Image (cartoon, rainbow, N blue to C red):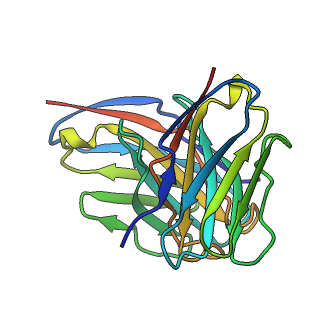
Amino acid sequence: GAGVSQSPSNKVTEKGKDVELRCDPISGHTALYWYRQRLGQGLEFLIYFQGNSAPDKSGLPSDRFSAERTGESVSTLTIQRTQQEDSAVYLCASSSQGNSYNSPLHFGNGTRLTVT
Amino acid sequence: AQKITQTQPGMFVQEKEAVTLDCTYDTSDQSYGLFWYKQPSSGEMIFLIYQGSYDEQNATEGRYSLNFQKARKSANLVISASQLGDSAMYFCAMRGRTDSWGKLQFGAGTQVVVTP
């Protein structure tokens, strides 16, 4: 079946504008994750959704960042009043069992965000 | 908190040789999972191999094997018979109960370059 799909693949925005990034997880995957990867660096956890449980938002860097998920499907990551330091690749991942330590994450190709 | 350490920022390896990528971790959890991912220059994150904390045998997947030494808290990735297509960034990651199952923690990564 289809993998994790993210859109847009690239986004250039002006400082101060809001952006929305979209993620379609693998069908049937109950868990969905957002990570950020700055150029040449590792992956930084942002937020995690598992079924109908309250999301783990502990990685969101500021209140300008928020995310929603509709049931067990699409998720949207919103960044308000973008800053240049928000420039990064935003990676979405899903897994079949979010509450199991042996379930690997499957990643999308990411959205490359550039704030000018 | 859990922590993943990859001490090798970059490595060169000749084609057909084996290479070992180091990964050490710190956790107080008894149950946890260890993962390795490959990220080629295209940016996608590719799941390679998984090792559970209770698995007695080292995991193997084709040319990839995981040298798991629980007492030393290390989970080194061994790539046998390196190919040019193995050139990529390699990330070690873990998840456990302490940081919530969803928060897959990543190391800083090791850049591998395979030379002819």
> Camera-side residue: A77 or B35?
A77
Q: Is residue B80 left or right of residue B116?
A: right
> Camera-side residue: A101 or B29?
A101
Q: Is residue B64 above or below residue B84?
A: below
Q: Is residue B45 left or right of residue B80?
A: right
Q: Is residue A24 above or below residue A60?
A: below
- Residue placed at 34% from the left, 59% from the top? B65
- Residue placed at 46% from the left, 75% from the top? B56
Is any part of residue B47 visible from this angle?
Answer: yes
Q: How many marks?
A: 0
Q: Where's residue B27, x and y in %?
A: 70, 58
Q: Residue furthest top?
A: A116
Q: Where's residue B99, x and y in %?
A: 75, 60
- Residue placed at 54% from the left, 28% from the top? A39
Q: Where's residue B58, x and y in %?
A: 40, 67
Q: Is residue B7 above or below residue A102?
A: above
Quarter of the figure with residue B85: top left
Q: Is residue B54 left or right of residue A61?
A: left
Q: Residue furthest right?
A: A63
Q: Where's residue B22, x and y in %?
A: 46, 44
- Residue placed at 18% from the left, 48% from the top? B81
Q: Is residue A30 left or right of residue A65?
A: left
Quadrant of the snapshot with the C terminus of chain B: top left
Is any part of residue B72 visible from this angle?
Answer: no
Quarter of the figure with residue B36: bottom left
